[in-house]
Amino acid sequence: MGKGRLEAFTDGVVAIIITIMVLEIKVPPGADLTAFSSSLPILFTYALSFLNIGIFWNNHHHMLHAATRVDGKVLWANLLLLFWLSLVPFVISWIDKTGFEPLPIACYGIVLSMAAISYHWLQQTILNCSGNHSVLATVIGRDLKGKLSVALYVGAIGLSFLSPWLALLTYVTVALMWLVPDRRIEAFAKKE
């Protein structure tokens, strides 16, 4: 099975997710700095979520570029990843409406954790489809950054109930870790 349809479908879903997120942002209630500053928390959450969606999309793109083929299991694993990513607009809207309460911020971490776990499952199904000696298997290696990300997300979920802002800072830290795609996959992409 070719990977072109999977890539196109994923691109479309990610575009819709980002569109929904931006449509959820409400304009400031006035035209002064006080009104604008009241919108800063949700703008921060939107920016973080946009970055996270972009990171998943970017790494997904690179992973599929290195993949040789996909099968039905890969399609289902991809759908699971997209399901969790599609919950991001819901959770950031909930964070905004509740004023950054601990439970919605913990749920944001749950969604990010499940997206990361789903991404790992997608990666594994692609590896199973492509073979353990494929280029993708070589460039992914032991995926320590992926495992560390899940651990930080899970830690931040608990931290949400002690300090929601520290939990958000942890989510930012994970995003910054992934801002640059895996250099090994980048090197492979340049050879193509």
Image: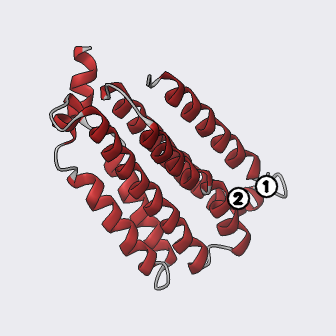
Q: Callout 2: few (<14), some (14-19), or many (20+) C-alpha neighbours within 10 Å? A: some
Residue 60 on image: x %, y %: 41, 37
Closer to the N terminus: mark 1 or mark 2? 1
Residue drawn at the location 79% of the way across and 51% of the way down: 27
Residue type of the residue flagged with mark 1: Pro
> Looking at the image, which is closer to me, 185 or 174?
185
Side (left or right) of 134 relative to 106: left
Q: Residue furthest top?
A: 192
State whether residue 7 is above or below residue 174.
above
Residue 174 on image: x %, y %: 36, 57
State whether residue 189 is above or below residue 119.
above
In the rendered image, which quarter contains the N terminus?
Answer: top left
In the rendered image, which quarter contains the C terminus?
Answer: top left
State whether residue 134 is above or below residue 101.
above
From the image, tell me which residue sits under label 2: 39
Side (left or right) of 161 relative to 184: right
Residue drawn at the location 52% of the way across and 74% of the way down: 106
Side (left or right) of 181 relative to 107: left
Residue 161 on image: x %, y %: 50, 84
Figure coloring:
secondary structure
Residue drawn at the location 62% of the way across and 38% of the way down: 13
Do the CB atoms of the residues marked 1 and 2 lie less than 8 Å apart? Answer: yes
Residue type of the residue flagged with mark 2: Ser
State whether residue 3 is above or below residue 33.
above
> Looking at the image, which is closer to me, 70 or 46?
70
Residue drawn at the location 34% of the way across and 38% of the way down: 126
Question: Cα distance, mark 1 to mark 2?
Answer: 6 Å
From the image, tell me which residue sits under label 1: 28
Instruction: Label 2: state its secondary structure.
Output: loop
Instruction: Label 1: state its secondary structure.
Output: loop
Q: Callout 1: few (<14), some (14-19), or many (20+) C-alpha neighbours within 10 Å? A: some
Q: Residue furthest bottom?
A: 162
